[in-house]
Amino acid sequence: MEQNVFHHAFSVDKSVCIGCTHCMKVCPTQAIRVRNGKAEVMPERCIDCGECYRVCPVHAFRIGEDDLSDIIQFPVKVALLPAVFTGQFPDDISTDRIYQAIHQLGFSHVHEVEQSVDFLKEKTLQYQISDDESPHISSFCPAIVRLIQIRFPSLTDNIIRLRVPHDLTAELIKNDFIKEGYKDSEIGIFYITPCAAKIAAVKSPVGEDKSVINGVINMDSLYNKVMALIKKEDKTSSAQHRTHLGADAITWSLTNGESKHAHGRALAIDGIKNVSEFLEKIENEEITDVDFLELRACDESCAGGILCTSNRFLTAERLQKRARKSELANRDSDLTGENNPEANRFLEQKMTLEHIEPRPIRLDIEIGTALKKIERIRELMCFLPGFDCGACGAPDCRALAEDIVQKKANVSDCVFMQHNNLLDREHAQRIIYKIWGEEALNKDCSKKGAKNEGN
Amino acid sequence: MHLKYKIQGGNFSKAGFASSEVKKILRQLSIEPKTIKRLVVALYEGEVNIVAHAYNGLITVDIDTEKVTVTLKDNGPGIPDIDKAMEQGYSTASAAVREMGFGAGMGLPNMKKNTDEMTIKSVVNEGTEVIFINYI
Ligand SMILES: Nc1ncnc2c1ncn2[C@@H]1O[C@H](COP(=O)(O)OP(=O)(O)OP(=O)(O)O)[C@@H](O)[C@H]1O
Ligand code: SF4
Ligand SMILES: [Mg+2]
């Protein structure tokens, strides 16, 4: 069963938010409004893609994470690293050294997320043959899964119901420790996340009851801790700490990482705007002849995750280099692949996702009422100016019309309607204050672009 | 809800506008995707027929809680033999229309298949009126 309350990693630090319109304008599900001079996020619409975080000029968005000290309670402390993590570091720091530093921080074991990719690659191909909801859409990026549930509900059945690498690898690791005699409660698996979407996916998973992951650590904070250690000490490591990852596994989370293995006509699209635009065409059946879609919210896929510290193009390049080296070594990943039939059999029991629910934004559950509301919106649009200026605290005129119909806003929230309806000055001012806060229109020379900027 | 769309004969670039607008509205009502698809296919064929065969037309769409009623009325040459026009593969489309990929004589049969009720009235040299109903 899916939960009705969605966990979001994001929160707005109201003491920092200056109440501009940047985040509101880029949100792909129109989940943000400005009220009392601060951004407010509607939890039922937010898909944790992080576009707001990226554009915020004052860094007012906060991303929650679990405490690194939480790992102490578990005898087995596993850090589950996505391959992009190793791509964050300068070339002169070896992967072994990075692993060693993570051990120094208290983890007893370090594994890479993509250990299950060889398995998943095979299963995806089989899925494409056995299921006929084409095009098949990868379930990899949780922001995309949520985008489809909310904005493209008719395409939810197209999402491949296979679990993602971090879940499969976590299952496998847990099972190995259980075989060694540990109890489930003694094994703590901590996922190092490149993005907020993955945090949401762990905390309120789609298509499964509960995640196997015990905690989530943000990649930027682990990076800083690892770098602090390495700076103090040696850059190289004497021992070999890492497990091997095959070339396909290393590049899986990059753009084209999945699509290049899929059957038929397979496309890779990154960037949430590009994805939305493409899904629109798929839903309208303007595009029909594709078989597989790898869709990722971030430009350059996970190399562009909002918690990545390094430049996304450099990260992608480093991973490509690492993949080439691995290819030359000609080895599979250590945990799955052809040499691990037992692991593959185990994962087969664990690989399937339950039904993925559509979650459309409805004007009303009662169709007659919904019809009336649509009519009213169309009528309101005759009067609203269509400038999409955002001064009403909604991302565009159409969103304001919707809010009005849903009784969350008023016609006079539009400054042009205030003018048209000859609202008296005080009344108009009260409305502006309600949306933008009482200080918003005061003279302030320290704001961005003003003569004393930053003072 | 009552919707109206004017259609201009010969203007293929705008054919499909009415059907995509109606689709957007039906989606907001969270109607079953398969139901939406049938209606949109039928409406699109009707739109194209006015553009391809008539001079100008008006489409009205009425949506209530149970059904969608679509009326496609045009000024045009009319259809002399409606039964014949309903046959698969029958077409009088001009060479220019065929060049644009239409004129396979599949439109009216496809409309019939994708609607719950459909009637055609036509007067030669005056025009044609197609009315269909789909239950939602
Ligand atoms: N609105 C109309 N006015 C006049 N004639 C029409 C109209 N609609 C259909 N017809 C006649 O009926 C014939 C069959 O229509 P139908 O839609 O089945 O095929 P088509 O339009 O010729 O080709 P297709 O729809 O496959 O592109 C047309 O060729 C035309 O002679
Ligand atoms: S592309 Fe990767 S980093 Fe970006 S939201 Fe999706 S899973 Fe997270
Ligand atoms: Mg036709």
Image (cartoon, coloured by chain):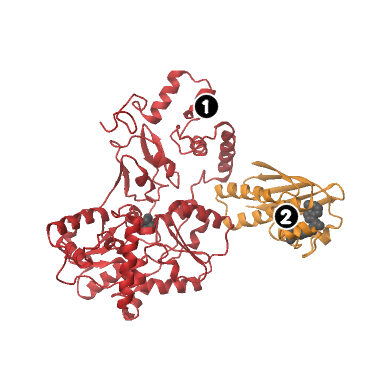
The x, y position of residue A219, in whole percent, is: 27, 56
In the image, A286 versus A321, the foreground residue is A321
Which mark, by number, is residue A305? none
Q: Which amino acid, mark 1?
A: Met
Label 2: which residue?
A: B117
Instruction: Measure the alpha-carbon separation of dots 1 and 2.
Output: 45 Å
- Of all chains, the one bearing label 1 is A
Q: Which mark is residue A417?
A: 1
Identify the image quadrant of residue A201.
Answer: bottom left
Rate crowding at label 1 as few (under 14), some (14 to 19) or many (20 or more) other CA atoms within 10 Å.
some
Q: Chain of mark 2?
A: B
As helix, strand or loop, the secondary structure at mark 1 comes to helix
Q: Residue furthest left?
A: A233
Left or right of A382 in this view: A263: left
| Circles 1 and 2 on the same subunit | no
Identify which residue is drawn at 61% across, 50% down: B23
From the image, state the color of chain A. Answer: red
Residue sitting at x 70%, y 56%: B116
Amino acid type at circle 2 is Glu
- Label 2 crowd bin: few (<14), some (14–19), many (20+), radius 10 Å: some
Quadrant, the C terminus of chain A: top left
Let me know if residue A19 appears in the view. Answer: yes
Q: Quadrant of residue A304?
A: bottom left
Residue A426: x and y, percent? 43, 19
In this view, A249 is above or below B33: below
Residue beneath the point at 32% across and 60% down: A315
Residue A152 position (above or below residue A162): above
Q: Quadrant of the N terminus of chain A?
A: bottom left
Question: Can you give x and y, in whole percent of width and height, for residue B132 in the image?
Answer: 72, 52
Tell me, by letter, which chain the rendering colours orange.
B
